[in-house]
Amino acid sequence: MSFFSTRGGSCVTASQAILRGLAPDGGLFVPAMFPQVSLGEIADLGQMPYPQRARDILARYLEDFSSREIEEAVSAAYSPDRFDDPAIAPLKPLDDQTWVLELFHGPTLAFKDMALQLLPHLTTLSARKNGEQREVSILVATSGDTGKAALEGFRDVPGTSCTVFYPLDGVSDVQRLQMVTTGGGNTHVIAVKGNFDDAQTGVKALFSSAEFAAEMDRRGRVLSSANSINFGRLVPQVVYYFSAYADLVARGAVRCGDPVNFCVPTGNFGNILAAYYAHQMGLPVGRLICASNRNNVLTDFFTSGIYSTHRLFFKTKSPSMDILVSSNLERLLFEAADRDGELVKTWMRLLKDCGSYSVGDQRREWMESVFWGGCADDNATLAEIGTRFHQDHYLMDTHTAVASNVLRQYRQAKNDPTPTVLVSTASPYKFSRDVLSGIAGTAAAEHLDAFACSAELEKRSGVPMPDQVRRLRDLPIRHRAECEVDGMGQAVLDAFT
Ligand SMILES: *Cc1c(COP(=O)(O)O)cnc(C)c1O
């Protein structure tokens, strides 16, 4: 399988796409075609443990990896000592037509672990395959969860280092503590005085700077990306959509071949794009419901066909979805443009120069046949947490609650009875204060620190607190660096001295 850039250029192998992250023309790597999975093969997945499901799907894309390499990588990544549920990505019933796909059972309690536990294995294998002698330096911009997941994934992996930038005031207490307490001899954590888009734009600029690449090369290092623009992040996420569907079939909840909807809390568009890729590979998908918070640029895009960043940026209670420029949307645009890289290039230039572009009515209608966009603000999010807890006895985090509320809106608007998988992206204990407010009112969380909120949440919900949260209180702070938005490159170089 070869990979192209969404902006028309390049033809590389899977391992080269993973190692480079971003294509040289600034585009994202996309597979030359979507390998097909038959209904029989999908049903068979239901009888396999998760690592084997992953091996089956990954092998179809990673053609320059041996089956032995893939097998060892997935067994190491999805092992019982890293995930606290033997199913890895368990599917739990929520109500008559809805199941929750829980993607937060990994070491950092967010769905990013599903990809970032595997990516370091794929990265080091890719480096070896391509004769790369330099140290692979991972650079990450995070809205909260990617950072810790990348740090945990790459911590002490030989031949790599991992530097994370997070927005100074844009992450939750638990998220920040998780990052700044990270151990390992090859990890760096730096707070940027700006928002997530500033951090992401800064990292992208470093990736496209020849000067910075030369500086790094002089230090014996080569840049690589663990952000969701990397195909190595995307492909492990395709697996759990097949896995969820196969579980529904195995339980007799749907007949193999019948459509299932997926409702996904969305930020950078990586998670839901993986669902779209699964659909293109033959997974019977009805609708992909794209849930946003008050930063509803995607909702407007799916309704109007116009992507516009001329809007205010809001900090919300679902910070991992506080994004104005959803990078992975470019991969959907590539498909919407009938894989015309020149057209994508034009849209991306308009976005950069004018802050907006329009895909036109025909392409908007094409997207509408699969996607539906909706949004929920903070009040609706907290109310949803309360409703799901008191009515359905399910405790969900703020991001999942955004999606749950949007699903409610979708069903009201479309009267669609299709069974639906609600994708849950974080443990409620990652956002204890807001989840506690959701089930017990804001007064319940007042005057409590982050740890007291978690303890109170455990008491009131009866859902056990994960060990990772309990231990956080006693870990020493190891990372205190801060930098200005325009000082990120220097901060990376300083980190290595
Ligand atoms: C990253 C993240 C999201 C958004 O996922 P994308 O792939 O960026 O759309 C949603 N919820 C949580 C908890 C996350 O960590």
Image (spheres, helix red, strand yellow):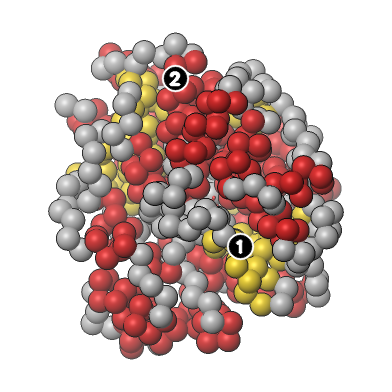
> Dot 1 corresponds to which residue?
91
Q: Position of residue 297 (x, y in %)?
A: 59, 57
* Quadrant assignment for the N terminus: top right
Q: Nearer the viewer, residue 335 or 233?
A: 233
Q: In screen coordinates, is 363 left or right of 100?
A: right
In this view of the protein, which residue sits in the foreground, 154 or 190?
Answer: 154
Q: Quadrant of residue 90?
A: bottom right
User: Horizontally, is 123 left or right of 492 in the view?
Assistant: right
Q: Residue 438: in sight, yes or no? A: yes
Residue type highlighted by circle 1: Leu
**Picture disc at residue 127:** 2
The C terminus - image quarter: top left
Query: Which amino acid type corresponds to the residue marked 2 in the rendered image?
Result: Ala
For residue 25, above or below residue 38: above
Residue at far front of view: 47
Determine the residue positioned at 76% across, 49% down: 43
Q: Residue 347: x, y in percent?
A: 65, 38
Packing grade of label 2 (10 A; few <14, some 14-19, many >=20) is many
Kindly indicate whether the residue at mark 1 contacts the one at mark 2 (C-beta within 8 angstroms): no
Is residue 375 among the parts visible in the rendering?
no
**Mark 2 element type:** helix
Q: CA distance from mark 2 to mark 1?
A: 35 Å
Q: Residue at x 49, y 22 (%)?
A: 126
Q: Position of residue 30 (x, y in %)?
A: 65, 31
The residue positioned 60% from the left and 67% from the top of the image is 92
Q: Nearer the viewer, mark 2 or mark 1?
A: 1
- Quarter of the image where one finds residue 132: top left
Instruction: Classify mark 1: helix, strand or loop.
Output: strand
Is the residue marked by circle 1 packed among few (<14), some (14-19), or many (20+) residues within 10 Å? many
